[in-house]
Image: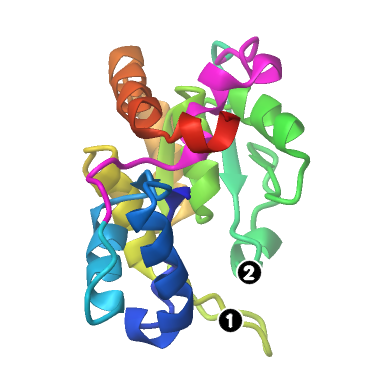
Amino acid sequence: VAGVGWNFKAPPAMLAPRTAALAALSKAGKLSAVRGPHTRAALALATPEGVPCPAVFGDPALFAALLIPKWQSLRRQPGGGLCIVPHADDLRLRHNSSAPDLTLVPTSAEPLDFARRLSRCGLVASSALHGIVIADALRVPSAWLWHQQPQPAGHSFAEDELKYLDYFAGIGQPASRISSVEEARAMLRAGPAPRLSVAALVELATRYIGRFPFGHVCA
């Protein structure tokens, strides 16, 4: 298990049967990393004995452009406009992001196409965690678009913010967020920078790969 992350919609104790399996993997040296320190803390509380986990953090998708050949040719394009990536359940953002000065990129897109489209953006504003992660992987400026607006009747968008805070803490970056598309437009006009330098991305990947149990996987 590498890069697992708690979604924080349920308390850790409710998932004891699954965490027992994680504990067994950990004892066998097969739990090599988690998304961030909040997930690590949740695993410590998930069973009476706790699930031991190394302090190696990061979402696996963060390293896609370093490890997957088809992604290695993707480069951030100069210029580019505002791209909105709504969470799959974020119907409010999906239905109100049709202005001519922005591009809507759904998370349902095929992964390589999703990444290619994000590489053309000047700023990615996302209520989906992996919109942020993939933008960081490609070193495209991104913003966590966190809003709590009413959803259309019969629908809800109830992601727990700890999932996002877990990711940012895992990569050692502040968890700054915006609450509207208007704020995203202002960020784009100000000329945002990528969240991670190449050196920081390589350092994270080096620690991650160094802890990966290749003996179990490749034997």
Pointer 1 or 2: first along the chain = 2
When the figure is inspected, residue 69 is found, relative to residue 4, above or below; the finding is: above
Of 89 and 186, the residue lying toward us: 89
Q: Note whether residue 33 is visible.
A: yes
Of 40 and 141, the residue lying toward us: 40
Amino acid carrying mark 1 in the image: Ser
Scheme of colours in the image: rainbow
Look at the numbered disc 2 and give the secondary structure of its residue: loop
The residue shown at (70%, 63%) is: 95
Q: Which residue is mark 2?
A: 89
Q: Which mark is residue 156?
A: 1
Amino acid carrying mark 2 in the image: Asp
Magenta span of residues: 53-76
Cα separation, mark 1 vs mark 2, equals 7 Å
Percent x, y of residue 36: 30, 50
Tell me the quarter of the picture where residue 39 sits: bottom left
In reply to whether residue 75 is colored magenta, the answer given is yes
Q: Is residue 169 left or right of residue 160?
A: left
Q: Note whether residue 148 is visible.
A: no
The residue shown at (27%, 59%) is: 40
Q: How many marks?
A: 2
Of 183 and 157, the residue lying toward us: 157
Q: Residues within 10 Å of mark 2 (few under 14, many from 20)?
A: some
Q: Are marks 1 and 2 in contact (CB under 8 Å)?
A: yes
Of 34 and 189, the residue lying toward us: 34
Q: Which mark is residue 124?
A: none
Tell me the quarter of the picture where residue 12 sits: bottom left
Percent x, y of residue 49: 22, 75
The residue shown at (58%, 81%) is: 156
